[in-house]
Image (cartoon, helix red, strand yellow):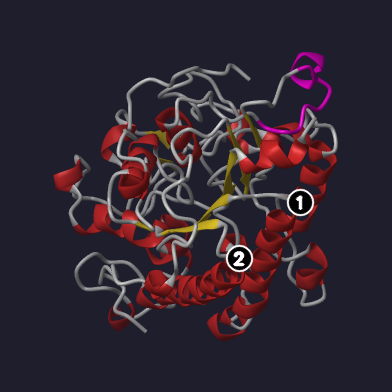
Amino acid sequence: MAVAHTIILVLLTTSWAWAAGTESTFGCYESIISFGDSIADTGNLRRLRSANNQPDSARLPYGRTFFHHPTGRFSDGRLIIDFIAESLGLPLVQPYLGGADAAVNDRSFDKGVNFAVAGATALDISFFEERGIYNPMTNVSLGTQLRWFKQFLATIPENRKFLQRSLILMGEIGGNDYNHPLEQGKSPQETQSFGTAIVDSIGSTIQELIKLGAKTILVPGNLPIGCIPAFLTKFEKSSSKQDYDSTIGCLNWLNELSIYHNELLQKELTRIQRLNPHVHIIYADYYNATLRLYLSPTQFGFSKDILRACCGAGGPYNFNEVVRCGNPGATCCDDPSIFTNWDGLHYTEAAYRLIAQGLLQGPYTTPRFKDICPSITISGPAAQVNEY
């Protein structure tokens, strides 16, 4: 495995053939269709829950930086998907689920629709329950989201053309397939053994979308989970000095698990690309786009205390499993923009902006966004702010 702090820019996907040529309309997409988990959820989990069982993301200080109220996003503001939408001149992508809100049910999804649900897994919930692993947040999986998508697509006139003109964001998805087992005491070895099944699920979903007409699919890898305050806190007592990266302080074996997943994913995407040379498949290197923030925090405007969460209830990493951000007893930092991590598990808007910038303008996609659409930029305010 690669050392946790080494940025890997030579991706397995260099063998991909960009056979579709230069006729791509990338940068001019008419809509964004999103699948995934809390990294991309713009409010679906909030709408899945009852009024007396709302997620932390439905309470302040979530949303404080940009929206100034909670939207269901697990951050203080915008997510990567929001910055991608802005860069394409599209409205922020609305959550598919409307719940009991009639006004929400009347929304139009002609510019984008988001099926991502916080806590969702790539594998069906039955896979984990058979192994004594339970999802504490939702029973939604990638398969559930695909079923919702097909129901939605059936309502769209000329749906194949609609899909061809859309940018598909496939995730990030799969991270919780590792997170939930690790959080519930499964060994690293058993957790890693799920990798092939996780990637197969993502791959089969991509192939299903291609059959339905998808032409451009952006597929993110997993993040450097060894740098997340929640895991640093959980494994602090059981870890030795040798388990940590000497440069950053992240847990090597957890970052190596992310690298393992990302290598499997890239191999699968290479296979699918060869079978479908007419389709644009783009690997998004979330791992290295994020890791650079930890390697050079002050260069990007962050505090040197890079591994602490902005919102939490104390401890070395400001994360307390019992008292999470948004609950009584937790406190929030004065300036989230100097923190990479928001609540111990998710990132701040400031970090998400830089990650998105690394994807759209930098070297962290294969093929490079900037080479395909040189006009893409990361702007300030959104082109259109949806108050949903």
Residue 6 higher or lower than 174, as above or below: below
Q: Is residue 1 left or right of residue 120?
A: left
Q: Is residue 316 visible?
A: no
338 or 66: nearer the viewer: 66
Residue 276's label in the rendered image is: 2
The C terminus sits in image quarter: top right
Residue 188 higher or lower than 10, as above or below: below
| Residue 100 highlighted magenta (yes or no) | yes
Instruction: Give the class, few, some or many, for how many residues have Cα within 10 Å of label 1's Cα (few <14, many ≥20).
Output: some
Q: Is residue 384 left or right of residue 296?
A: right
For residue 338, what is the image quadrant? top left
Q: Secondary structure at mark 1?
A: helix
Query: How many angstroms separate mark 2 from mark 1 (CA)?
Result: 20 Å
**Residue segment shown in magenta:** 95-106
Residue drawn 35% across the image and 38% down it: 353
Residue drawn 80% across the image and 30% down it: 157
How many marks do you count on the picture?
A: 2
Q: Which residue is mark 1?
A: 146
Q: Nearer the viewer, mark 2 or mark 1?
A: 2
Magenta segment main secondary structure = loop
Amino acid type assigned to the residue bearing label 2 in the image: Asn
Q: Earlier in the sequence, mark 2 or mark 1?
A: 1
Residue 276 higher or lower than 78, as above or below: below
The N terminus sits in image quarter: bottom left
Instruction: Give the class, few, some or many, for how many residues have Cα within 10 Å of label 2's Cα (few <14, many ≥20).
Output: some
Percent position of residue 32, x then y: 58, 37
- The outermost residue toward the left is 299
For residue 205, what is the image quadrant? bottom right
Amino acid type assigned to the residue bearing label 1 in the image: Leu
Q: Is residue 286 left or right of residue 125?
A: left
Percent position of residue 160, x then y: 73, 42
